[in-house]
Amino acid sequence: MRLTPENKKKITNRIRAGAAEVFREQGFDAVNLDKLMKQAGLTRGAFYAHYRSKAALLSDVMQHEHPLLRMLEARDSASAEELFEQMLAIFDGYLDPANLDEVFRGCTLAALTGDATRAETKVKTAFGVAFEAICEEMAREQNHNGAAYAPALVLASGAVRTAQAVEGDALRINILSGAHQAFSTLLPKAAKE
Protein backbone atom coordinates (compact mmCIF):
# COMPACT_ATOMS: atom_id res chain seq x y z
CA MET A 1 0.00 0.00 0.00
CA ARG A 2 1.42 3.37 -1.05
CA LEU A 3 1.11 6.41 1.12
CA THR A 4 -0.21 9.60 -0.41
CA PRO A 5 1.90 12.67 0.39
CA GLU A 6 -0.97 13.99 2.51
CA ASN A 7 -1.24 10.79 4.56
CA LYS A 8 2.53 10.57 4.94
CA LYS A 9 2.58 14.13 6.30
CA LYS A 10 -0.19 13.31 8.80
CA ILE A 11 1.69 10.23 9.99
CA THR A 12 4.96 12.16 10.23
CA ASN A 13 3.21 14.80 12.33
CA ARG A 14 1.73 12.09 14.56
CA ILE A 15 5.15 10.49 15.05
CA ARG A 16 6.73 13.86 15.83
CA ALA A 17 4.01 14.91 18.30
CA GLY A 18 4.16 11.56 20.10
CA ALA A 19 7.95 11.63 20.17
CA ALA A 20 7.90 15.12 21.67
CA GLU A 21 5.80 13.85 24.57
CA VAL A 22 8.03 10.82 25.16
CA PHE A 23 11.31 12.75 24.78
CA ARG A 24 10.11 15.45 27.21
CA GLU A 25 8.99 12.85 29.73
CA GLN A 26 11.93 10.43 29.54
CA GLY A 27 14.76 12.16 27.69
CA PHE A 28 16.25 11.33 24.31
CA ASP A 29 18.66 8.60 25.41
CA ALA A 30 16.07 6.68 27.45
CA VAL A 31 13.72 6.18 24.50
CA ASN A 32 14.07 3.55 21.78
CA LEU A 33 12.32 3.40 18.41
CA ASP A 34 9.82 0.81 19.59
CA LYS A 35 8.61 3.14 22.35
CA LEU A 36 8.45 6.13 19.98
CA MET A 37 6.43 4.27 17.37
CA LYS A 38 4.13 2.73 19.98
CA GLN A 39 3.31 6.26 21.15
CA ALA A 40 2.29 7.07 17.56
CA GLY A 41 0.29 3.85 17.27
CA LEU A 42 2.64 2.42 14.64
CA THR A 43 5.24 -0.32 14.39
CA ARG A 44 8.98 0.19 14.37
CA GLY A 45 9.12 -0.82 10.71
CA ALA A 46 7.25 2.33 9.69
CA PHE A 47 9.82 4.66 11.26
CA TYR A 48 12.29 4.80 8.39
CA ALA A 49 9.61 5.81 5.90
CA HIS A 50 9.49 9.11 7.82
CA TYR A 51 12.90 9.68 9.43
CA ARG A 52 16.48 8.62 8.74
CA SER A 53 17.39 8.34 12.41
CA LYS A 54 16.23 9.00 15.93
CA ALA A 55 18.44 12.12 15.91
CA ALA A 56 16.61 13.37 12.80
CA LEU A 57 13.34 12.92 14.67
CA LEU A 58 14.75 14.83 17.66
CA SER A 59 15.78 17.64 15.31
CA ASP A 60 12.24 17.79 13.93
CA VAL A 61 10.80 17.82 17.45
CA MET A 62 13.19 20.60 18.48
CA GLN A 63 12.14 22.75 15.56
CA HIS A 64 8.38 22.20 15.57
CA GLU A 65 7.01 20.92 18.89
CA HIS A 66 6.67 24.00 21.09
CA PRO A 67 3.31 24.49 22.80
CA LEU A 68 4.69 27.71 24.32
CA LEU A 69 5.18 29.11 20.82
CA ARG A 70 1.65 28.08 19.82
CA MET A 71 0.22 29.82 22.89
CA LEU A 72 2.11 33.01 22.08
CA GLU A 73 1.03 32.84 18.43
CA ALA A 74 -2.60 32.46 19.52
CA ARG A 75 -2.61 35.86 21.25
CA ASP A 76 -5.29 37.93 19.59
CA SER A 77 -5.12 41.68 19.82
CA ALA A 78 -4.56 44.70 17.66
CA SER A 79 -2.88 46.54 20.51
CA ALA A 80 0.83 46.18 21.25
CA GLU A 81 0.14 46.78 24.95
CA GLU A 82 -2.51 44.05 25.06
CA LEU A 83 -0.17 41.62 23.28
CA PHE A 84 2.47 42.39 25.90
CA GLU A 85 -0.03 41.84 28.74
CA GLN A 86 -1.19 38.57 27.19
CA MET A 87 2.44 37.45 26.94
CA LEU A 88 2.92 38.26 30.63
CA ALA A 89 -0.20 36.24 31.48
CA ILE A 90 1.16 33.23 29.57
CA PHE A 91 4.39 33.38 31.55
CA ASP A 92 2.48 33.89 34.81
CA GLY A 93 0.96 30.47 34.19
CA TYR A 94 4.24 29.06 32.91
CA LEU A 95 6.05 29.99 36.13
CA ASP A 96 3.21 29.10 38.51
CA PRO A 97 4.39 26.31 40.84
CA ALA A 98 0.95 24.68 40.59
CA ASN A 99 1.60 24.12 36.86
CA LEU A 100 5.18 22.85 37.12
CA ASP A 101 4.65 19.22 36.13
CA GLU A 102 2.31 20.11 33.26
CA VAL A 103 4.59 22.86 31.95
CA PHE A 104 7.68 20.64 32.11
CA ARG A 105 5.89 17.80 30.25
CA GLY A 106 4.73 20.31 27.64
CA CYS A 107 7.75 22.57 27.14
CA THR A 108 10.43 21.38 24.78
CA LEU A 109 12.74 24.21 25.84
CA ALA A 110 12.56 23.29 29.51
CA ALA A 111 12.54 19.52 29.13
CA LEU A 112 15.03 19.02 26.30
CA THR A 113 17.69 21.72 26.66
CA GLY A 114 20.12 19.15 28.09
CA ASP A 115 19.48 16.80 25.19
CA ALA A 116 20.06 19.63 22.71
CA THR A 117 23.28 20.55 24.49
CA ARG A 118 24.70 17.07 23.89
CA ALA A 119 23.22 16.60 20.41
CA GLU A 120 24.65 16.90 16.94
CA THR A 121 24.75 20.26 15.14
CA LYS A 122 21.50 19.67 13.24
CA VAL A 123 19.58 19.31 16.50
CA LYS A 124 21.23 22.38 18.01
CA THR A 125 20.38 24.37 14.91
CA ALA A 126 16.72 23.29 15.10
CA PHE A 127 16.61 24.15 18.80
CA GLY A 128 18.06 27.59 18.03
CA VAL A 129 15.52 28.22 15.27
CA ALA A 130 12.67 27.45 17.67
CA PHE A 131 14.20 29.52 20.47
CA GLU A 132 14.50 32.52 18.15
CA ALA A 133 10.92 32.01 16.90
CA ILE A 134 9.63 32.08 20.48
CA CYS A 135 11.60 35.26 21.21
CA GLU A 136 10.30 36.89 18.03
CA GLU A 137 6.75 35.96 18.97
CA MET A 138 7.26 37.43 22.46
CA ALA A 139 8.37 40.63 20.71
CA ARG A 140 5.41 40.79 18.30
CA GLU A 141 4.31 44.41 17.75
CA GLN A 142 6.82 45.66 20.32
CA ASN A 143 9.62 48.17 19.73
CA HIS A 144 12.38 45.57 20.09
CA ASN A 145 13.49 42.53 18.17
CA GLY A 146 13.29 39.05 19.59
CA ALA A 147 16.89 39.03 20.85
CA ALA A 148 15.84 41.50 23.55
CA TYR A 149 13.51 38.84 24.97
CA ALA A 150 16.07 36.01 25.07
CA PRO A 151 17.26 36.59 28.67
CA ALA A 152 13.69 36.42 30.01
CA LEU A 153 12.98 33.24 28.05
CA VAL A 154 16.19 31.62 29.28
CA LEU A 155 15.28 32.55 32.85
CA ALA A 156 11.74 31.15 32.57
CA SER A 157 12.61 27.87 30.84
CA GLY A 158 15.68 27.38 33.03
CA ALA A 159 13.64 27.94 36.17
CA VAL A 160 11.12 25.32 35.09
CA ARG A 161 13.91 22.86 34.30
CA THR A 162 15.69 23.51 37.59
CA ALA A 163 12.50 23.36 39.67
CA GLN A 164 11.66 20.02 38.07
CA ALA A 165 15.17 18.73 38.85
CA VAL A 166 15.06 19.39 42.59
CA GLU A 167 13.20 17.61 45.36
CA GLY A 168 10.91 19.44 47.74
CA ASP A 169 7.98 21.76 47.19
CA ALA A 170 9.47 24.65 49.17
CA LEU A 171 12.58 24.78 47.01
CA ARG A 172 10.56 24.44 43.79
CA ILE A 173 8.25 27.26 44.85
CA ASN A 174 11.24 29.43 45.75
CA ILE A 175 12.88 28.84 42.35
CA LEU A 176 9.74 29.56 40.35
CA SER A 177 8.64 32.52 42.48
CA GLY A 178 12.06 34.13 42.21
CA ALA A 179 12.10 33.58 38.46
CA HIS A 180 8.60 35.02 38.17
CA GLN A 181 9.66 38.17 40.02
CA ALA A 182 12.78 38.57 37.87
CA PHE A 183 11.08 37.72 34.56
CA SER A 184 9.42 41.08 33.98
CA THR A 185 12.57 42.97 34.94
CA LEU A 186 14.39 41.29 32.05
CA LEU A 187 11.78 42.34 29.48
CA PRO A 188 11.99 45.49 27.41
CA LYS A 189 9.15 47.94 28.12
CA ALA A 190 5.86 47.35 26.35
CA ALA A 191 5.26 49.38 23.22
CA LYS A 192 2.77 52.21 23.62
CA GLU A 193 0.13 52.91 21.00
Image: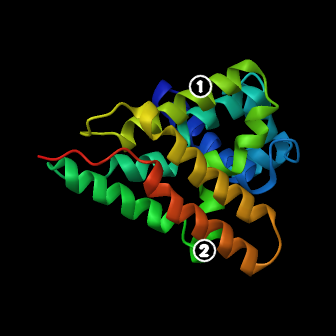
In percent of the image, x 59 and y 45: which residue is there?
154
The answer to the question of whether label 2 and label 1 lie on touching residues, with beta carbons closer than 8 A, is no
Q: Is residue 76 visible?
A: no
Determine the image quadrant of residue 174.
Answer: bottom right
Tell me the element at label 2.
Answer: helix
In percent of the image, x 49 and y 31: which residue is there?
132
| Vertical relation: 50 (above or below) 191 | above
- Label 2 is placed on what type of residue? Pro
| Vertical relation: 125 (above or below) 105 | above
Q: First in sequence: mark 2 or mark 1?
A: 1
- Where is residue 86? Give x, y as percent: 31, 59
Tell me the element at label 1.
Answer: loop
In percent of the image, x 29 and y 59: which residue is there?
85
Q: Which residue is mark 1?
A: 2
Q: Which mark is residue 97?
A: 2
Alpha carbon distance from label 2 to label 1:
48 Å
- Label 1 is placed on what type of residue? Arg
Horizontal side of 110 relative to 7 (left or right) equals right
